[in-house]
Image (cartoon, grey):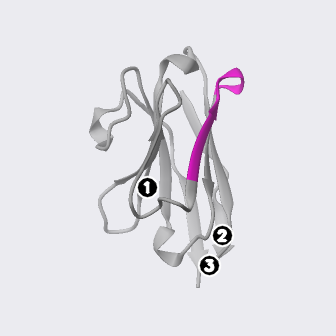
Amino acid sequence: QLQASGGGLVQAGGSLRLSCAASGRTFSNYAMGWFRQAPGKKREFVGGISRSILTYYADSVKGRFTISRDNAKNTVYLQMNSLQPEDTAVYYCAADSLTVYYTWDNYDYWGQGTQVTVSS
C-alpha cells in the first residue's frame, strides 16, 4: 500500500516536498516512480529511483526536482523546487519489483494522488 502526501498550493518559484509512504512489503525491494497527471492530459513520468538508488528524471523537471528514498522509513520523497504553473497536476507514486519504468502501466502498485497547484 502506498500513501502519497505533501501536495498543496504554492506560488511560482516555490517548493514542495512530496512523500510516499509504503507499507505491507519490503520497501527496499522496490523501484519507485513518480508520475503526474494534469487535467485533460495523459499521466506522465516525473522521475524514479531504483533499488540501487539510481535516479531518473523527465527532461521537464531535471535540475528542479530531486527524488530520494529512506528505506528505514519506507518512504520515497520528491523534492520540487522552482515550481511553475505547468507543474500543476495530481502527483502519484508507484512501486515495481523490478525497475523504474517510464510508463505508468508497468508498475505493480499505485498510491492515491496528491494535488499540487502552482499559482502564477
- Residue at the (31%, 65%) spot, across then down: 41
Position of residue 86 measured from the top left corner of the image (x, y, whole percent): 46, 74
- Lower position in the chain sequence, tag 1 or tag 3: 3
- Residue at the (41%, 64%) spot, across then down: 60
Q: Which mark is residue 71?
A: none
Span highlighted in magenta in the image: 66-74
- Residue at the (62%, 78%) spot, across then down: 12
Q: Which mark is residue 9?
A: 2
Position of residue 73 measured from the top left corner of the image (x, y, whole percent): 71, 26
**For the residue marked with disc 2, what is the amino acid?**
Leu
Mark 3 sits on what residue?
12
Give the alpha-carbon distance from disc 2 to disc 3, as whole Å.
10 Å
Query: Which secondary structure lies at badge 1?
Result: strand
Position of residue 49 measured from the top left corner of the image (x, y, whole percent): 49, 36
Foreground mark, 2 or 3? 3
**For the residue marked with disc 3, what is the amino acid?**
Ala
Residue sticking out furthest to the right = 73
Q: Quadrant of residue 33?
A: top left
Q: Quadrant of residue 76?
A: top right
Say few, some or many: other residues with alpha carbon within 10 Å of mark 2 (under 14 / 14 to 19 / 20 or more).
some
Position of residue 113 measured from the top left corner of the image (x, y, whole percent): 51, 49
Query: Which secondary structure lies at badge 2?
Result: strand
Mark 1 sits on what residue?
36
Residue 78 seen in the figure = yes
Vertical order, 106 against 47 (above or below): above
Give the alpha-carbon distance from disc 2 to disc 1, as whole Å.
15 Å
